[in-house]
Image (tube, rainbow, N blue to C red):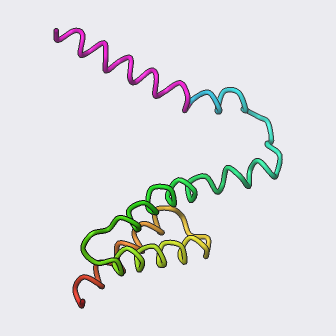
Amino acid sequence: MKSEIVWMIIGMGVVTFIPRMLPFVLFRGKELPEFLQGVLRNVPYATLGALIFPGILFIQEDIWYGVLGAVVAFGIAFLGANVIVVVLGSIAVLSLYSLFF
């Protein structure tokens, strides 16, 4: 039983490692086209939007809480900030909002 869990953890590690390592191995020393680089630069923001948007629509307590968080997140992302800055900025604004309203 215990060895099955260990093998399962090792297997999950290998399955996670392979897709992350393949691009480094396959594209080593190669320059991607500018269009593809632009698309790949926007993937984190698209993923963030896909994760946040349903939460905005289905918030139960205060709809303005979700709307304000989305506006701040989209605004910071539009300025070109890193994804972590977008998330932290939105959290900071919503923390202030919850303190005063």
Q: In the image shown, does 33 or 50 lie closer to the viewer?
A: 50
Residue sitting at 31 percent across and 16 percent down? 8
Residue 51 x %, y %: 45, 56
Residue sitting at 48 percent across and 27 percent down? 17
In the rendered structure, the answer to whether residue 34 lies left or right of residue 98 reads: right
- Asked if the stretch drawn in magenta spans residue 6, the answer is yes
Residue sitting at 42 percent across and 60 percent down? 54
In the rendered structure, the answer to whether residue 1 lies left or right of residue 52 reads: left
Q: What stretch is highlighted in magenta?
A: 1-20
Q: Where's the N terminus, which quadrant? A: top left
Residue 97 x %, y %: 30, 85
Residue 70 against residue 96 in the figure, above or below: above
Residue 13 x %, y %: 40, 24
Residue 94 against residue 87 in the figure, above or below: below
Looking at the image, which residue sits at the far bottom? 100
- Asked if the stretch drawn in magenta spans residue 64, the answer is no
In the rendered structure, the answer to whether residue 31 lies left or right of residue 9 reads: right
Q: What is the number of callouts on the image?
A: 0
Q: In the image shown, does 35 or 54 lie closer to the viewer?
A: 54
Q: In which quarter of the image is residue 44?
A: bottom right
Looking at the image, which residue sits at the far left? 1
Residue 41 against residue 94 in the figure, above or below: above
Q: In which quarter of the image is residue 61?
A: bottom left
Provide the major secondary structure of the magenta segment.
Answer: helix
Residue sitting at 57 percent across and 56 percent down? 46
In the rendered structure, the answer to whether residue 43 lies left or right of residue 38 reads: left
Q: Where's the C terminus, which quadrant? A: bottom left
